[in-house]
């Protein structure tokens, strides 16, 4: 008989000012500099959402600097 390890916790997708994503356990205080993005679910659901929306891994400040330089 195999034992299945199922994570039943709920997570939030969080976002920082540099538009970088992470997940955070629901019910815990979100660290300074981060805010809830609006997605809540299982770990797998939250990671799947991040995979869909976080298409450019570069920090926002770097993207803006590159755009301003015309490169």
Image (spheres, rainbow, N blue to C red):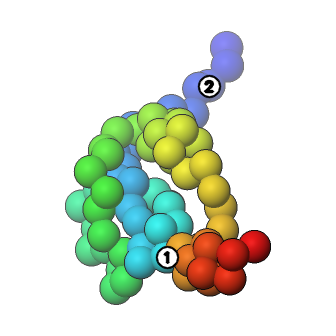
Which residue in the structure is indicated by mark 2?
3
Work out which residue is located at the far front of the displayed protein and give it: 70
- Residue drawn where x is 41% and y is 38% of the image: 42
Q: Position of residue 11 (x, y in %)?
A: 37, 50
Real-space CA distance between mark 2 and mark 1, rounded to the nearest whole angstrom: 40 Å
Quarter location, residue 71: bottom right
- Residue drawn where x is 24% and y is 61% of the image: 27
Element marked by disc 2: loop
Work out which residue is located at the far right of the displayed protein and give it: 71
Relative side of 33 to 19, left or right: left
Q: Position of residue 38 (x, y in %)?
A: 26, 51
- Residue drawn where x is 54% and y is 38% of the image: 52
Which tag is nearer the camera, tag 2 or tag 1?
A: 1
Q: Nearer the viewer, residue 2 or 18?
A: 18
Q: Nearer the viewer, residue 70 or 4?
A: 70
Kindly identify which numbered label has been placed on residue 18: 1
Residue 10 in view of the camera: yes
Element marked by disc 1: loop
Q: Position of residue 64 (x, y in %)?
A: 56, 77
In the depicted structure, whether residue 58 falls above or below residue 52: below
Residue 7 in view of the camera: no
Q: Position of residue 69 (x, y in %)?
A: 68, 82
Work out which residue is located at the far top of the displayed protein and give it: 1
Disc 2: CA contacts within 10 A as few (<14), some (14-19) or many (>=20): few
Quarter location, residue 58: bottom right
First-in-chain label (2 vs 1): 2
């Amino acid at each position: 008989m195999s034992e299945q390890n199922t994570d039943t916790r709920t997570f939030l997708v969080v976002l920082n000012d540099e538009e970088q994503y992470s997940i955070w356990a629901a019910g815990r205080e979100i660290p300074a500099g981060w805010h809830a993005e609006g997605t809540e679910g299982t770990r797998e659901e939250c990671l799947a959402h991040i995979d869909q929306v976080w298409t450019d891994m570069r920090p926002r400040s770097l993207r803006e600097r590159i755009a301003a330089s015309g490169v």
